[in-house]
């Protein structure tokens, strides 16, 4: 389903309502004409006239009253043709709505609008590409309510990228530079907007549009060219993030080991689980003097010491009998929940 502006949506809705009303009016008019004729001119009771009109239009064929005049027979023939024409018109229009998909589109858009109207303080994510997908999954793990916007993917394609179901996720297909699309995403009640588009001009335009609709929304934006930083600030971006530069710095730091005194943190997402790698300095912690086996890492925390850094030595896959000393650092790997519990027991 491609993006449909509110003007097009309203036009479709008005057209559907207008044609449905027209169909109902035509059927009512045929019923009224037939009932009044048989009642006033053919001597039938009102109930008999109504019943005979109904079976005539539906071509059920219960038979004609014996007292029906010749003109009445001609009128009945015209009534049958008129009834069939009205029914065929109505059926053909409903069929066209289903085949063209207008009715389905309208119902789907209305369903999304109802869901968005119920959320408050949510986060809008613009662009569900590589960065946007990671943002959405991380927000869902944090149990946030998210409305994602993208104009290149269908809802089915986006759902395949989502691995977490802990938060609430709503997808709006459309161009986020369009005010109507942002309004459909609930921009006026949103707490924050994260735009992850790969084009700086588009991110700036999205920010300007969002700030115009909700000056209090907190905007985080991807920036691909640092020369455009001042433009992002002037546009109202609260937190521009140069993702490419950050990734480059992180890679260089990992290779050159310039951050020896700090914990190096990396995150890996696999399906609905989030794993973390930390480098922890043993000195000054309750780990000092402990044997690895005694920590019961797998049993209690489901984490692993994958390496030990001692002075200039790098020990990959240490023995369970190794003792942790003040002059070493450990490389810890595991799920975030397990690492956090481990930290509380030995580091905090």
Image (cartoon, rainbow, N blue to C red):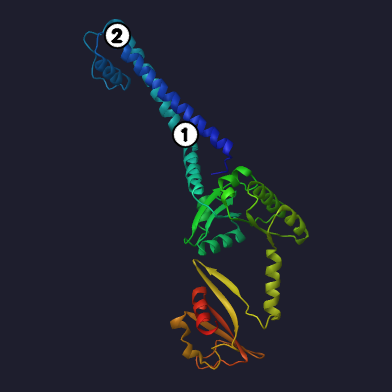
Secondary structure of the residue carrying tag 2 is helix
User: What is the crowding at mark 1: few (fewer than 14 residues within 10 Å), some, or many (at least 20)?
Assistant: some
The single residue placed furthest to the top in the displayed view is 70
Front position in the image: 347 or 244? 347
Image depth: mark 1 or mark 2 in front = 2
For the point 50% across and 40% down, which residue is it?
A: 105
In the drawing, does residue 238 fall left or right of residue 51?
right
Q: In which quarter of the image is residue 6?
A: top right
> In whole angstroms, how far apart are the C-alphas of marks 1 and 2?
39 Å
- Residue at 51% x, 45% y: name it: 113
* Secondary structure of residue under mark 1: helix
Q: How many numbered marks have been drawn onto this rendered protein structure?
A: 2
* Marks 1 and 2 close (CB-CB < 8 Å): no
| Residue matched to label 2 | 40
Which residue is outermost to the left? Answer: 66
> Of the numbered discs in the image, which one, if any, rests on residue 227?
none
Q: Where is residue 210 in the image (x, y as percent from the top left)?
A: 64, 49
Going from the N terminus, do you reach mark 1 or mark 2 first?
A: 2
| View extreme (right): residue | 227
Task: Return the residue at label 1.
Answer: 97
Q: In which quarter of the image is residue 315?
A: bottom right
Asked whether, in this view, residue 267 is left or right of residue 71, the answer is right
In front here: 263 or 23? 263
Instruction: Say which of 216 and 298 sits in front.
Output: 216
Q: Residue at x 47, y 79 (%)?
A: 302
Rendered position, 348 above or below 250: below
Quarter of the rendering occupied by the C terminus? bottom right
Residue beneath the point at 54% across and 68% down: 269
Q: Dot 2: within a 10 Å radius of its alpha carbon, few (fewer than 14), some, or many (20 or more) residues?
A: few
Which sits in the foreground, 15 or 62?
15
């Amino acid at each position: 389903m491609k993006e449909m502006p509110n003007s097009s949506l309203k036009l479709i809705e008005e057209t559907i309502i207008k044609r449905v009303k027209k169909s109902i009016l035509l059927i009512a008019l045929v019923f009224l004409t037939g009932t009044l004729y048989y009642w006033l001119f053919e001597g039938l009771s009102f109930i008999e006239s109504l019943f005979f009109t109904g079976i005539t239009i539906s071509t059920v064929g219960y038979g004609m009253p014996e007292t029906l005049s010749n003109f009445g027979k001609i009128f009945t023939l015209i009534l049958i043709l008129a009834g069939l024409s009205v029914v065929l018109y109505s059926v053909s229009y409903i069929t066209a709505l289903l085949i063209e998909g207008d009715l389905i589109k309208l119902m789907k858009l209305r369903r999304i609008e109802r869901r968005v109207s119920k959320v408050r303080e949510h986060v809008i994510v613009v662009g569900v590409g590589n960065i946007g997908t990671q943002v959405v999954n991380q927000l869902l793990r944090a149990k946030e309510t998210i409305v994602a916007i993208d104009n290149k993917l269908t809802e089915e394609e986006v759902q395949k990228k989502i691995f977490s179901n802990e938060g609430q996720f709503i997808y709006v297909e459309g161009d986020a530079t369009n005010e109507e699309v942002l309004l459909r995403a609930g921009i006026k009640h949103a707490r924050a907007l994260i735009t992850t588009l790969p084009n700086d001009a588009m991110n700036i335009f999205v920010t300007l549009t969002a700030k115009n609709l909700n000056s209090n929304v907190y905007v985080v934006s991807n920036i691909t060219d640092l020369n455009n930083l001042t433009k992002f600030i002037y546009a109202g971006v609260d937190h521009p993030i140069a993702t490419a530069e950050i990734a480059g710095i992180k890679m260089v730091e990992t290779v050159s080991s310039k951050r020896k005194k700090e914990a190096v943190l990396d995150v890996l997402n696999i399906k609905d689980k989030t794993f973390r790698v930390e480098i922890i300095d043993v000195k000054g912690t309750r780990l000092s003097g402990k044997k690895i086996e005694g920590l019961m890492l797998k049993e209690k925390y489901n984490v692993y010491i994958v390496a030990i850094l001692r002075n200039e030595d790098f020990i990959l896959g240490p023995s369970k009998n190794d003792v942790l000393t003040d002059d070493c650092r450990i490389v810890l790997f595991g799920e975030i929940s397990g690492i956090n519990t481990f930290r509380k027991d030995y580091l905090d």
